[in-house]
Amino acid sequence: MKRGKIALGTPLFFRFSKTGKDVDTGTQADMLIHESVFLSQILQSGTVANPGSPTFRATVAFDPSLINPLPIVYPVYSGNVAFPGPMAYVSGAHVTIKTGVFWSVSGSVLSILFPAIVTSARYAIIRQEAP
């Protein structure tokens, strides 16, 4: 039984099911979170590739009129969004390899910093209400 499903692209899915309910077969009433009833609105989403050396930093522009934009960014492994995003794993040689992506927002630009091992990330920009 699968309890969570996130696809920050087209079509957009952001669902977590109640205990005992499968996220793929359950109804909207069976979900704890469902993308169609967010209190905030997802305004933009997509996939960003790791540009590689020397910066390992990618940027995404979004609507500068947004009030309190909230980014959601997760690394992609083998074509799947890693949720929750792992920060590291131990290789066969017992070496810790950093796998998390880090991001910041300045003005109307989302900046994503990748470790070398992560090839891409999926993102969404959510509009929040003014405080």
Image (cartoon, grey):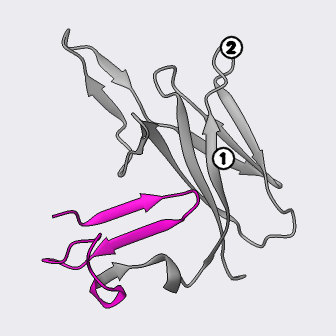
Q: Is residue 118 above or below residue 4?
A: above
State the mark number for residue 104.
Answer: 1
Residue 92, image x and y in percent? Answer: 18, 13
Q: Nearer the viewer, residue 1 or 102?
A: 1
Name the residue that disc number 2 marks.
Answer: 54
State the mark number for residue 16.
Answer: none
Mark 1 Cα-neighbour bin, 10 Å: few <14, some 14–19, many ≥20: few
Mark 2 Cα-neighbour bin, 10 Å: few <14, some 14–19, many ≥20: few
Is 11 within the magenta? yes
Main structural element of the magenta stretch: helix, strand or loop?
A: loop
Identify residue type, mark 2. Pro
- Residue at horizontal 36%, vertical 51%? 83
Is 106 within the magenta? no
Give residue 59's quadrant in the image: top right
Identify residue type, mark 1. Ser
Please count the marks in the image.
2
- Residue at horizontal 20%, vertical 8%? 93
Give residue 5's quadrant in the image: bottom left
Q: Is residue 113 above or below residue 72?
A: above
Q: Which of marks 1 and 2 is nearer the N terminus?
A: 2
